Amino acid sequence: MAINYIKPEKLNLKNHPELNEKWVQEIIAQDPSILGLGSLILKDKERIQPHAGRLDLLLQDEDATKRYEVEIQLGKTDESHIIRTIEYWDIERKRYPQYEHCAVIIAEDITSRFLNVISLFNGAIPLIAIQMNAIKVGDNTSLMFTIVLNQLTLGFVDEDEEVSEATDRNYWEQKATKQTVAMADEILEFVKTISPDFELKYNKFYIGLANNGQPNNFALFRPRKNLMRFELRIPKSDEIENKIEAAGLEMLDYDNKWGRYRIKLNKEDIKNNKEFIIELLKTAYDK
């Protein structure tokens, strides 16, 4: 069977007589997944910013933990547009600090020169740049989105400290107590049911884990004078939180920035919840 090839026509939306920025905005609003940023929902569009105009689109992930401040530009990126994008991001993150926020700029032409400028912000400012192409095939028009600059993935705080802040067991026994540091030993034995080569790694701000000498901090320990804070790198979910509550453990909070549950433990908690703690460890290890 012969396959017919139809050469697509690339459209210039900035100079198009009918298709405009409003049209692009509506297409994205109807299906934000076309941006390639995952499964997102529309939170708002043309969102009024105090003394700063209107934000084109506000998108949010399905877990309601992260928001994307999206600005659309036809044609080439320019200085005023990136400043406006960052300004809207800054306003939203200050108004709603309970969410993680990321600025997104969409343009038909993100030039190499401008990409270099944007790259200077990436890391200090979570910023994603997406190039948009409008394609016409026959009587149909489609939009294609390509991420040309992704948000810098921040390393976990422990991974950075692992290199420069190494300490030893004596440091922690002085900072906390021998008894609470020994609680980390007990949980290490649970970890060894997953892999027998794990060991404790002592750092200035936490006690971590290493497997054959390589850091793998899916769980962290922060001993105190009378208890130990136990941290697990597990995606936030109602199921996990319900299980923690049912086990009678005290959950301090969920650290959205680092993706960790923080649980307060004493010696009795470890003794009475061995199987559940192993279950949590396996969940964190597998993620």
Image (tube, rainbow, N blue to C red):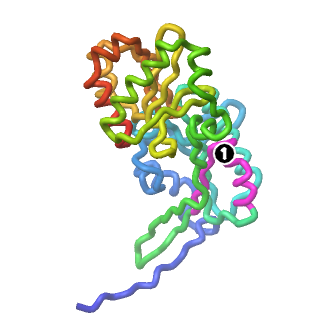
The local secondary structure at tag 1 comes to loop
Front-most of residues 121 and 88:
121
Front-most of residues 287 and 4:
287
Q: Quadrant of the C terminus?
A: top left
Up the image or down, 126 lies above or below 116; here it is above
Residue 119 visible within the image: yes
Residue at the farthest front position: 170
Name the amino acid type tagged 1.
Gly
Up the image or down, 151 lies above or below 43; here it is below
Up the image or down, 169 lies above or below 248; here it is below
Up the image or down, 57 lies above or below 201; here it is below
Give the left or right position of residue 147, taking residue 278 as reference.
right
Query: At x 34% / y 23%, what residue is drawn?
Result: 241
Instruction: Give the x, y percent position of residue 65.
Output: 47, 33
Range shown magenta: 114-131
Neighbours of disc 1 within 10 Å: few (<14), some (14-19), many (20+): few
Q: Quadrant of the N terminus?
A: bottom left
**Residue 69 drawn in magenta:** no
Q: Which residue is mark 1?
A: 123
State the count of labels: 1
Instruction: Give the x, y percent position of residue 43.
Output: 47, 37
Instruction: Give the x, y percent position of residue 233.
Output: 44, 34
Instruction: Give the x, y percent position of residue 180.
Output: 48, 14
Query: At x 61% / y 64%, what residue is drawn?
Result: 108
